[in-house]
Image (cartoon, rainbow, N blue to C red):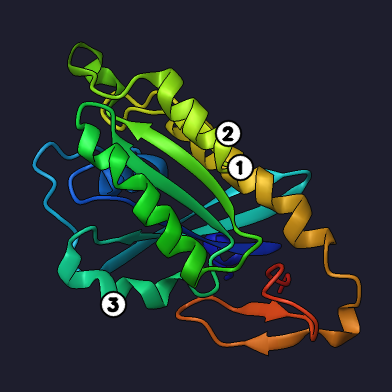
Amino acid sequence: MTNREDEYDYLFKVVLIGDSGVGKSNLLSRFTRNEFNLESKSTIGVEFATRSIQVEGKTVKAQIWDTAGQERYRAITSAYYRGAVGALLVYDIAKHLTYENAERWLKELQDHADSNIVIMLVGNKSDLRHLRAVPTDEAKAFSEANGLSFLETSALDSSNVELAFHTILTGMFPVRVFFTPNYENLQRRNSPGVPMFKDNTGPALFLLSK
């Protein structure tokens, strides 16, 4: 019997990036398992989980990679940008330094990832509004200046977590599925854990259905 988790039309790789401690792991667990761990520890290296959603009548399986934010893992995680078609760049609204570092993370993403990657800036821990250090308008202005979508979330109380992931997945769907003009030129591309495809003229554009 076929596992329903194995039944999908498209498989998209999404990466979570940002400083250590901003809540990337809890965003991942909240979206994929509806779980939150107050005692969550820093990710070591790279972890991933999956969840499928419906987009325009198709089953889209998101393979979401939680990349460690510590400096000592930067060389490891940079390899995992390859093949990603979406990214959530996460900062902590109560720690301005994590927001300041978003520019560095964005540059690293642009240096290593597909130029067509869909990116959302995510201000996490919106439940800590009484400790807010990053004004919403400031983050919105940064997003607009860099062509990013923007949302504030809380993995603790689930606020906007579903919306963030659904927005990034639906945002990449029409581009990745319909942008490639010549299906006969598709070639298999190896990427860690993800069956990526590309045409002969450009970067990875979409993930072919099974």
Nearer-N-terminus badge (3/2): 3
Q: Secondary structure at mark 3?
A: helix
Q: Is 93 drawn above or below residue 164 in the view shown?
A: above
Image quarter of the C terminus: bottom right
Residue 168 falls in image quadrant: top right
Is the Cβ of the residue at disc 2 closer than 8 Å to that at disc 1? yes
Q: Foreground: 154 or 134?
A: 134
Give the residue at mark 1: 147
Give how far across and how far down residue 176 sits, in percent: 73, 60
Extreme-top residue of the structure:
130
Horizontal side of 137 relative to 148 (left or right) equals: left
Horizontal side of 173 relative to 163 (left or right) equals: right
Residue 128: mark in rendering: none
Kindly identify the amino acid type of the residue bearing the numbered disc 2.
Glu
Circle 3 packing at 10 Å, graded few (<14), some (14-19), many (20+), is: few
Q: Residue at x 90, y 71 (%)?
A: 181
Residue 76: mark in rendering: 3
Q: Secondary structure at mark 1?
A: loop
Q: CA distance from mark 2 to mark 1?
A: 5 Å
Q: Is 15 drawn above or below residue 114 in the view shown?
A: above
Give the residue at mark 2: 144
Give how far across and how far down residue 69 sits, in percent: 23, 58
Extreme-front residue of the structure:
145
Give how far across and how far down residue 52 sits, in percent: 56, 52
